Image (cartoon, rainbow, N blue to C red):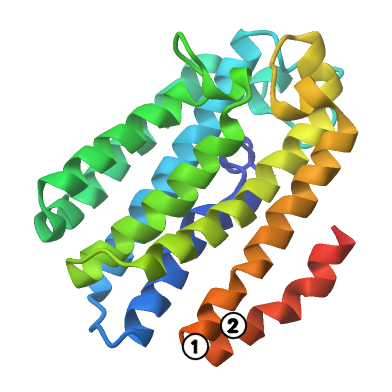
């Protein structure tokens, strides 16, 4: 695989676009007309933000000495010497710029509040692992994912389509955030020994494997329990179809 493709971590990018797709489905189900320019711009922006976060994480973890030759899991391009830290940082900033450019249409449609949400989101692509209070190093990464990939993503997308706020979007955002967090929890579970040794105090590093297994169970269980909400609001298919994924959740 090309070092550049390896650096953006393609397997993680579903977490960026799934909230856009599912919230679009919610807005359509609630009778709103979908603006496909909003959909396209949102997909581009969220993909760019996710890629920028991955790139900064790669370079910053190398700078801090967290990623070493002993780590397990996918190759990190800066640590492996496949790309220089300068190249990785530069590409990260380039994707931040692309996120800003693709988000201009969203600002046009949604107003100043969307601009501020976008700017804060761009800042946290770096502050997730960098800056004076790196969230990932203080056990706040899980909450970051629930907040940005769940609540912010769903509520913002729903607002862009409908110019309104809705309990539907909040519930959906909670489910999305919980499921996206499973990705980072499993990642941190894999790395918890090396993270602990290098003082990257994720929740996995702080509390160990038993806590992580309980956390993954809770993330899945609470997300599925929220299907009751969709059943009670008359969205029968929306409440039942996701149950087809239960075998995969149980396996995980």
Residue 90 location, quadrant: top left
Residue 33 location, quadrant: bottom left
User: Horizontal and vertical percent for residue 229?
Assistant: 53, 75
Residue 41 location, quadrant: bottom left
Q: Residue at x 25, y 51 (%)?
A: 102
Q: Residues within 10 Å of mark 2 (few under 14, many from 20)?
A: some
Disc 1: which residue: 235
Secondary structure under the numbered disc 2 in the rendered image:
helix
User: Horizontal and vertical percent for residue 64?
Assistant: 63, 8
Disc 2: which residue: 239
Position above or below: 133 against 181: above
User: Horizontal and vertical percent for residue 61?
Assistant: 63, 17
Decide which of 170, 182 is in the foreground and name it.
Answer: 170
CB atoms of marks 1 and 2 within 8 Å: yes
Q: Residue at x 20, y 38 (%)?
A: 116
- Quarter of the C terminus within the rendering: bottom right
């Amino acid at each position: 695989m090309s070092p550049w493709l390896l650096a953006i971590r393609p397997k993680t990018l579903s977490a960026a676009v799934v909230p856009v797709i599912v919230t679009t489905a919610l807005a359509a189900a609630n009778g709103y007309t979908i603006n496909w320019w909003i959909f396209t711009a949102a997909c581009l922006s969220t993909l760019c933000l996710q890629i920028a976060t991955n790139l900064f994480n790669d370079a910053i973890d190398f700078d801090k000495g967290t990623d070493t030759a002993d780590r397990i899991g996918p190759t990190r391009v800066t640590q492996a010497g496949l790309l220089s830290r300068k190249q990785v940082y530069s590409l990260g900033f380039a994707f931040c710029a692309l996120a800003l450019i693709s988000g201009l249409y969203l600002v046009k449609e949604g107003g100043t509040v969307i601009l501020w949400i976008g700017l804060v989101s761009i800042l946290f692509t770096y502050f997730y692992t960098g800056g004076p209070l790196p969230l990932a190093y203080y056990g706040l990464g899980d909450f970051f994912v629930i907040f940005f990939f769940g609540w912010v993503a769903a509520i913002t997308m729903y607002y862009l389509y409908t110019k309104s706020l809705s309990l539907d979007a909040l519930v959906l955002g909670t489910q999305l955030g919980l499921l996206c967090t499973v990705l980072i929890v499993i990642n941190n579970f894999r790395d918890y020994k090396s993270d602990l040794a290098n003082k990257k105090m994720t929740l996995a590093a702080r509390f160990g494997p038993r806590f992580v297994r309980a956390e993954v169970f809770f993330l899945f269980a609470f997300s599925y329990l929220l299907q009751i909400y969709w059943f009670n609001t008359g969205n029968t298919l929306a409440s039942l179809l996701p149950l087809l994924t239960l075998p995969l959740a149980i396996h995980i």
